[in-house]
Amino acid sequence: METLEKIRSALTTHGLKVTPQRIAVYKALLELGNHPDTDQIIAQVTGEHPTISPGTIYKTLDLFAEYKIINRIKTDTGRMRFDHRTSAHHHLYDKTTDRIVDFDDDELNRILSDYFARKSPRDFEIEDVKLQIVGKFK
Amino acid sequence: METLEKIRSALTTHGLKVTPQRIAVYKALLELGNHPDTDQIIAQVTGEHPTISPGTIYKTLDLFAEYKIINRIKTDTGRMRFDHRTSAHHHLYDKTTDRIVDFDDDELNRILSDYFARKSPRDFEIEDVKLQIVGKFK
DNA sequence: CTATATGCAAACAATTTGCAAGACT
DNA sequence: AGTCTTGCAAATTGTTTGCATATAG
């Protein structure tokens, strides 16, 4: 499977072992797609891999996040969400349904980087700028 | 005390009772100023009001947030933070120190509203746009 | 072979809940 | 007086930890 090559090489380049559990967690993230929470990930993974333990899944997600293989997202519900996309992008967030949809637009990114190039906050080194666009899906 | 009039009237206009506990929690938020977490709020409130229970403080903060008297902020640590400012503003966030500083600039807000007026995401009604500017304080 | 990773179950932290007793309006 | 609110302690939720066993490199 070709898409899984990414995780294999990411693990090996960091000197981490390529285990069936780690592959399964990454595969679940790809399959679930849109910003799943831990419960969904656990359900998906244990579906095909019943002996895996929740603790391992947590550890694996932490590991992936630590090596920036995936992103953690925090929402207002206090439940952690994950995203296999690593490139910078923004989020549309509907707090009534807790739905998150990616939003990305080159013009927006250009506008933001222009702005911060001119008016960067003093005494602060910017690493990343993320927009949380809160509202309702129609 | 004049600043506490705001919370008194906010409570009465919503038909909520003005209790010493609610006043104390709001006062603590004003005194602590910069985005305290629950532990700090509890410590501050119990300092002057030793009989108040943590449960009450949690309930009070929830209530204030529900009526938009204060804002909840979620950071990467999973600990909830609060902000007595209700007007829209952005945050500088340093994940190494977990420090949050308000950032607000009219030009930025104008740029953003211009942009979204032209290029609003389809099927989504925007209520609020918040920037999380991640980086390091120098 | 050896270091790393897993599974399990117990521990934890932050927050929430239920309810009797108390306080605002 | 009546309803809303508080305090307390127990329950819950989501996540982390420790350690013996298993497994990838």
Image (spheres, coloured by chain):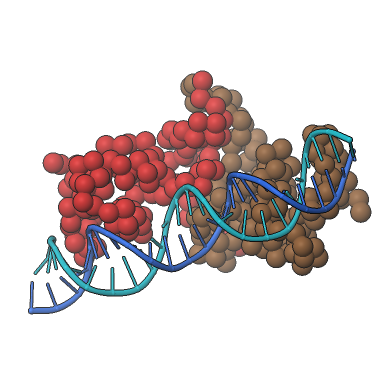
Chain colours: A red, B brown, C blue, D cyan
Number of disc labels: 0
Q: Is residue A72 left or right of residue A125?
A: left
Residue A17 screen position, x and y as percent? 19, 61
Q: Looking at the picture, tell me which residue is in the foreground, A40 or A91.
A: A40
Image quadrant where residue B70 sits: top right
Image quadrant where residue B116 sits: top right
**What residue is shown at x 23% (from left), y 41% (from top)?**
A47
Image quadrant where residue A3 sits: top left
Vertical relation: C3 (above or below) B107: below
Residue D16 screen position, x and y as percent? 41, 63
**Which residue is at the far right?**
B1
Vertical relation: A59 (above or below) B130: below
Residue A33 screen position, x and y as percent? 32, 36
Residue D1 screen position, x and y as percent? 89, 35
> Which quarter of the rendering shows the N terminus of chain A?
top left
Vertical relation: A19 (above or below) B6: below
Can I make out residue A90 in this image?
Answer: yes
**What residue is shown at x 21% (from left), y 47% (from top)?**
A50
Q: Is residue D14 left or right of residue A25?
A: right
**What residue is shown at x 70% (from left), y 65% (from top)?**
B43
**What residue is shown at x 32% (from left), y 57% (from top)?**
A55
Can I make out residue B116 in this image?
Answer: no
